[in-house]
Image (cartoon, rainbow, N blue to C red):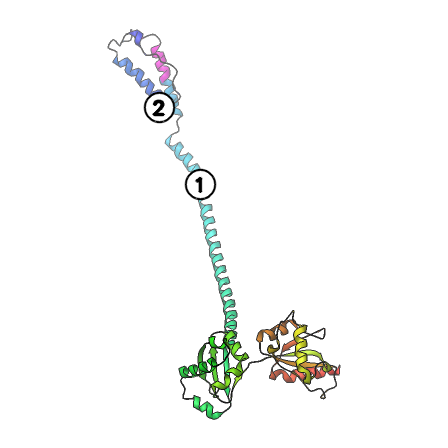
Amino acid sequence: MGPSTWPKLGPSPDSFEKHASKLKEEINGFKSDSAYDRDSTPAGTYRIMRSSISALNDKILKQPTANQLYGSMENVRIPLQGVQNTASETHDSIQQIQKTTTSISFTADRISTTTKTYASAASSCTSILLKQIRIRLHSQTTAEAFRVFSATRLKIHIQEAIYKSADLRMKKIEVTAANQLKSGDLAISTASPQDAAILRENVKDWDKEVAEGAEVQIPVYTIAVHGIYSKSIELNKIEEAKQGIILANIRTVPCNLKDIRRMSWIFRAHEVKAKSSIIIIEFTNPHTANAFIENGMVYQDQLHDCEQYSPESKGQQRKRAKDMCKL
């Protein structure tokens, strides 16, 4: 390679890696030339190469040292560690909140379950009572005769008595259980409260088929109605009074004549001189009785308070009625 073929050194690249590579190529060009000597080197070549080497050295010296890099990394790591600690604390807080929420949810579920259990238990109890029917045996001889019956035989006997009714609805009713009580009376259970209600409505179709002198006990739900004018209800016209109650309350408490079994005054008219008193009404439907207790009873365009009545509270209610008469 002659002097005219020496490489031309142009501007140095910005990257020190590329700068070093280019400088190495130029130096290799010098070494590969067989006529290489100081006199044959083009003028200015050494100055250009020295300048290039100096620039490369400056680039290398400007690169950060390992300690500087480590310090920079530490400066970044410390804030990151703080961020990580904050994230960890946040995560722990979220977990604590989730645990608290789970605990609250579990407690709420327990409260809800307890509430539903009591409500369902009360509903279940009412449903069971409405499905049961008690048959009173007035003859002790008849009661003793049933003592030898097994539960299965007693159930079949009562089922056959029901099937003898001409009412087609009766033929669809199934007796699910039957047993004899210590008193000698019989107790049966039907598949649904509706079936028991049909049996109570059609007592005359099947009770005597069970046994001579058998009587189906109809449960009653009695309320006391306050403030009824004494002359507004005559016991010899009780059916008219029943019809008046049904029509007056048809919007708030719908019922029919079958729901009202009996009506009577809490005391006789001649016992006290009063314009108003308390009348006792027996219902065969517990829902109707409860509705009147909650909503009151309209009679002769007046709203009268109602409350549950039981024989135990009869004395207190009689006293209350007499006290009202003295006012």
Please state which of residues 62 and 98 is positioned toward the viewer in this rendering.
Answer: 98
Which residue sits at x=30%, y=17%?
25
Please state which of residues 195 and 161 is positioned toward the viewer in this rendering.
Answer: 161
Magenta stretch encompasses residue 299: no
Residue that carries the numbered disc 1 in the rendered image: 80
Q: Is residue 28 left or right of residue 251?
A: left
Horizontal and vertical percent for residue 58? Answer: 39, 21
Q: Residue 59 carries which label?
A: none
Q: Quadrant of the C terminus?
A: bottom right
Q: Residue 201's image quarter?
A: bottom right
Q: In which quarter of the image is the N terminus?
A: top left
Which residue sits at x=62%, y=77%?
257
Q: Is residue 19 left or right of residue 297?
A: left
Horizontal and vertical percent for residue 104? Answer: 50, 60
Q: Is residue 258 left or right of residue 2?
A: right
Mark 2: which secondary structure?
helix
Asked whether the beta carbons under mark 2 and mark 1 sit within 8 Å of each other, the answer is no
Which residue sits at x=52%, y=69%?
119
Q: Mark 2 or mark 1: name the one nearer the start of the chain.
A: 2
Q: What residue type is labelled 1?
A: Leu
Q: What residue type is labelled 2?
A: Glu
Using a 10 Å C-alpha cutoff, classify the residue at mark 1 as few (fewer than 14 neighbours), some (14 to 19) or many (20 or more): few
Mark 1: which secondary structure?
helix
Which residue sits at x=43%, y=42%?
81
Magenta stretch encompasses residue 46: yes
> How many labels sit on residues?
2
Please state which of residues 104 and 6 is positioned toward the viewer in this rendering.
Answer: 104
Report the magenta residues as a range. 40-52
Residue that carries the numbered disc 2 in the rendered image: 17
Q: Main secondary structure of the magenta part?
A: helix
